[in-house]
Image: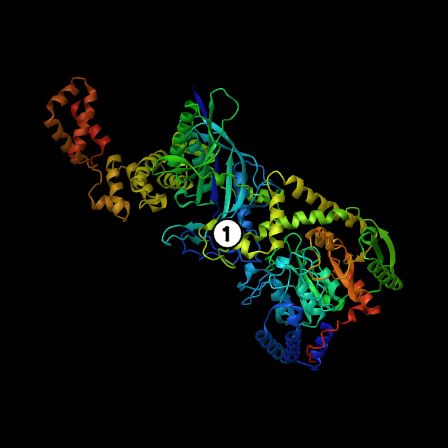
Amino acid sequence: MQYETVIGLEVHVQLSTESKLFSGSATKFGAEPNTQANIFDLAMPGTLPVLNGKAVAMAVKFGVAIGAEIGKHSVFDRKNYFYPDLPKGYQVSQLDYPTVGKGTLTVTLDDGSEKVIGVTRAHMEEDAGKSLHEDYQGMTGIDLNRAGTPLLEIVSEPDLRSAKEAVAYLKKLHSIIRYLDISDAIMAQGSMRCDANVSIRPVGQEEFGTRTEIKNINSFKFVERAINYEVQRQKDVLEDGGRIVQETRLYDADKDETRSMRSKEVANDYRYFPEPDLLPIVIDDAYIEAIRATLPELPDTRGARFVSEYGLSEYDAGVLVATREMADYFETTAKLSGDAKLAANWVSQDLQALLNKHGWELDESPIQAERLAMLIQRIKDNTISGKIAKTVFDAMLDDSSDVDAIIEAKGLKQVTDSGALESLVDKVIAENPDQAQQYRDGKVQVIGFLVGQCMQLSKGKANPAQVNEILRGKLS
Amino acid sequence: MIEKTVAELSAALAAGETTSVALTQAYLDQIAAHNETLNAYITVCADSALAQARAADEARAAGSTAPLLGIPIAHKDLFCTEGVKTTSGSKILHNFISPYDATVVERMQAAGAVMLGKTNMDEFAMGSSNESSYYGAARNPWNLDRVPGGSSGGSAAAVAADLCAMATGTDTGGSIRQPAAFCGITGLKPSYGRVSRWGMIAYASSLDQAGPLCKTAEDAAILLNVMAGVDDKDSTSIDLPTEDFSAALNDSLEGLRIGLPKQHFAEGLNPAIDRAIRSAVAELEKLGAVVKEIDLPNSDLAISAYYVIAPAEASANLSRFDGVRYGYRCENPVDLEDMYKRSRSEGFGEEVKRRIMIGTYALSAGFYDAYYRKAQKIRRLVKEDYARAFEEVDVIIGPTTPSPAFELDSMKDSVTMYLEDIYTIALNLAGLPGMSVPAGFVDGLPIGMQIVAKDYAEAKLLNVAHQFQQVTDWHKQKPALSTAAKTKEA
């Protein structure tokens, strides 16, 4: 039987506020255990929450960016369950009245087509602490540094139809969040986390199949793998005449499989009720408009502008705007070099390959936009050829001096002296009499071979256009 | 000296008739003589109290005129006090030394008050008799076989027996007013949000409110001046212009409109209390007040709504007592679940466990609408009842309790006990301010008159109570403490 996959994602994003959602403790990643936990975070008796207004502003900013309804009257609720890394015994979240309501996100699929994915809601809640199970001789250590860090939980509609679509949605979400600068959104560090609700149904059936929720997926790659594994597992179950059990499953990246969590955890009744220690968040239009005014240019708009302003292809523009940093880098390079197309090629190909090879973030690259722009300028003013530029680019990795100094020091400057070029051409014609004759006989395409020989002889430093011209002159 | 009011002590200290050290020592002596019988204090801080008293005397010499300078106070044991054991009347916090001060404690300290110790209370403020305290029941100074009321029973007994000059309490369903009535003192529950809840161990967050227990309305005004005010650590505290609650104490009651809710003078009320309250109201009429009967049609629903909302909130508020970070932890837990179960089963008392279970049930899937949501609807109806009544009257007056202090161990089932709060509980649901002032005696036991005003109209309440105390002397009556006990004048 042919099945259709139905996926909805729940994405938790740690908002990058300096202090926690309800306390003044810092939220820095990687601090010594329990050094960022005050009496409220420890749930000392008598302590009370005070809402961090910056977290609200970030949530609203996200809502406005995806064209969502903003809750004018949002309410925090207590979600009750016992766990040692949840000091109060309840997590403060938003159940019925989230700060961000329905919105949409447009993703570009592999075939270039666009698809609009519904966002059901995005609500604020506090993160839990961490349980440390190693190094405590059979005991469990508790680190409450993370407890109370503000999270935005972004829930999608079940609009995604494949693992690839899910990843495209997740990447788009990541991109927007980075553009808005409301979270580091680093999956490996847990500042962006993804749970996937996955079900399958026979093609043509309207009713959804029974879903499972996959937790603990901490990279884009694993999202794709976990969903694909789960879809195949569900198909196998159904084909064998079984039925899907609604449950929570954990993704094990090492084994590349999902497995059932204890059913007990699934059967939790969280007994939500409105948090009486906090007042509802009341938001008016003026507040929303003030936040809207702070929105940066978002990836879709920026991509469209790159196409119209710089004449890039939609594909190139799409690649360059994927992250705000990359788009900024490109734009700086394009402006300083005066050649957007060359800039686009260098950024999306050579620079990207470099980052991938070393696993660097853009800001870790030893070649920043100003230097790359200078390199492109030197291609444009014929100081070096495009090919030699690659050599210079590689040299720039280990040498932080300026582009001209590197070209000079390595003797890579293009040869444009016509006397030198003429003797070069003479030498090549002399060494390749057959090809020279073929050209004279009218097989003009052989010129390419002869130019190539000149370039090789000059170790790439000859100006190819000049060589071409001299060759034609001498052979005519 | 120890029987004097805060206002009188303040004057005596200012005039140099006594010192804070002498006064503090006198209260400590009274505590030494009577606390064993009354069990009003869980913790007495003799050394630090004397040190604070010395500091207060020095501050006075240096020119300080802080409003409560050198006057000894007792705090209910659910106010967190830095470096001092804070138990909330529970075994689960038997070893809890608070790392910080509650805002109320901080404000009292800033006003110069000297902390004598921490008073007994029903466990986590759940009770109307003080019998649910892990530290044993406090006794009523008027009759040691009787309860002092609850949950602020220790504070009320301590004030009535001069084991302190003044005390703090909290009121979630009547926990200041009912013990004040039972012990023959003055107690004020301010409007919800008037006093910060930071550092007050929560029972039911949307109902809890701190207030003073003291000897007169005049004292209550002085104490409220210190306690009240917005606090950025409590999001539910209200930002209102600063008010001097003593300013209107002497306003005339001419033309004051008093409403007597017919539901508060109905079946179930001890007839002698009915008579006492009516004659108290007659005193107010003599001062120019006009009286009319009013209707609070949803009164009978208030207790049921309260016993859903309060336990629901409590069931979550008390989840933090899990044996993980502080407080009681069971011996040799075999795993996490065992630790949770036994720490909580062994650490909480019966009444607390009962309310956690009621609250958990009321919030459970499938029951939420029938219980919690319905209770919230009733809460709105109760609020509307009072709002409607206040269109016609300035204050609402009735008995604080249906009967005088009952005997220890006499309440055999919890529902009968819950009905003790029948006149007080609606105010917490509505968030309104209320007071209890002494209004007579029944069978040798003091009884209280409850006065209720609109939101944030504490000044009106205090005015009425003060004027009443100008023409009556019920509040001046003192219990005859056991003659065997040595008392010493300061």
Left or right, A424 with respect to B139, comes to left
Relative to B130, say whether A104 is above or below.
above
What is the crowding at mark 1: few (fewer than 14 residues within 10 Å), some, or many (at least 20)?
many
Please report the residue visible at 62 percent of the width from the left and 64 percent of the height from the top: B136
- Label 1: chain? B
Where's residue B56, x and y in %?
A: 62, 76
Q: SS for tag 1?
A: helix
Horizontal arrangement in the rendering, residue A109 relative to residue B117 (left or right): left
What x and y, as percent, mark residue A98? 58, 41
Residue B442 sits above or below residue A456 on the image: below
| Res. A277 in view | no
- Is residue B304 in view? yes
The quadrant in which the N terminus of chain B is found is bottom right
- Relative placement, left or right, of B190 versus A25 is right
Residue occupied by mark 1? B340
In terms of image quadrants, where is residue B105?
A: bottom right
Q: Residue B405: image x %, image y %?
A: 74, 62
Q: Nearer the viewer, residue B340 or B472?
A: B340
